[in-house]
Amino acid sequence: MTPLAPASLPPVLALLPDEAVTKYLGRGIQSGRELPPQVALTRACAAYDERTAERRRTAPVRELLDEAMRRFADDRYAADGWLAPRLHATLRMTRAEAADGRLWNHLAMVVAPDYVVWRHKGADDAEGPGIATAARFSGPHYTQTFSRLWWAAELFRDGDDYRPVEIACRIQDVLNTTMRLDVVDHRPTAQAVIRVVGGLLDAKAARPGDRVNAFSAAVNAAGSTLMYDVLARDVEPDVDELHDWIRDGAGEAVDWDRLPEGPYDGRVEAASVEALLPLFERLGQEAPLRRRKTAGADGEGREVSVPAPRSVGVSLVKPSDFA
């Protein structure tokens, strides 16, 4: 069954409270058999101020999502790597603005509920049609359908370069697990993680998702005893360049066939990434694997796993490693 699409779109995005999503979201909507009640949801929304609304036009976003569903009709998982940088470059905003979950609620419930179902709907079974879980409509930044893509692009881009984002999105566990870690807020750590992930892909390693989960757990545990920002210096991004980028192109359509450019707010110093790589490569090699979980209700179990319950950190890392 093809998920239902809204018959008409509001001209700009708005802010939809979590309570409204909880009130109106049901299995009919989650399975794509029903549309959310657009009138009731619109009444529950708070509007952006006029200046911000100019940067929140829905048409370019909706066109981007329609193109993703067309291009990746045969492999919905592959849509993430194509869509994440383009969504980020279309919805240009600060991290503070992106942290407002009401924006993503509106996009999921009012503008593109059909995309949520298309991307995350689980398989039908004897008990009934598959659904997209509620957290895909309104949930944490690493779970909600659109927030997870925007934040993947924000956390893993290297300044204006979105190529690391494409690598990050090729293994679902980077979005499902690695993005939950506070350590990826440190830009050299994020880039070093992607270097290791890229190495797994280049080597065509077996069970790459399992390895990413185990590696992420090891990086996080090591980071509890070591300060990555001490080992690998990071310079503050250029806030003026970020705001210029937001002002100059927010809400505009991006090229579908060429990777967009992010803000010129500064790339990570190569020396900082290189300082972390020996440690991270060792963590990737030594982190133990564990049996996979079964697939979840939204069909995301293709490469889902659980890291083994082993303490890493001091036992794997010594000050002499960085002498």
Image (tube, rainbow, N blue to C red):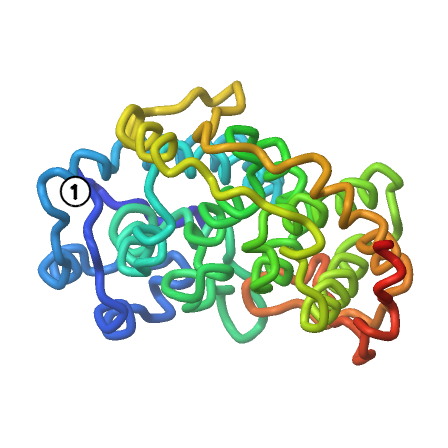
Residue 245 falls in image quadrant: top left
Image point (41%, 32%), residue name: 89
Q: Is residue 314 above or below residue 11?
A: below
Where in the figure is residue 252, as x and y percent of width and height? Answer: 30, 26
37 to the left or right of 119: left
The total number of labels drawn is 1
Image coordinates for residue 299, horizontal then vertical, percent: 60, 61
Q: Residue at x 46, y 67 (%)?
A: 133
User: Residue 266 location in percent, x, y?
Assistant: 51, 32
Q: For mark 1, what is the residue?
A: 10
Q: Position of residue 309 (x, y in %)?
A: 79, 80
Compared with residue 189, is residue 7 higher up or lower down, i.e. above or below?
above
Vertical placement of 264 versus 155: above or below?
A: above
Quarter of the C terminus within the rendering: bottom right
Vertically, is 290 above or below 206? below
Q: Does residue 238 appear in this view?
A: yes
- Identify which residue is drawn at 23% across, 39% down: 56
Q: Secondary structure at mark 1?
A: loop
Closest to the observer, 318 or 302: 318
**Horizontal side of residue 87 vs 216, given as left or right:** left
Pointer 1 local density, CA inside 10 Å: few below 14, some 14–19, many at least 20: few
| Residue nearer the viewer, 316 or 258 | 316
Residue type beneath disc 1 = Pro
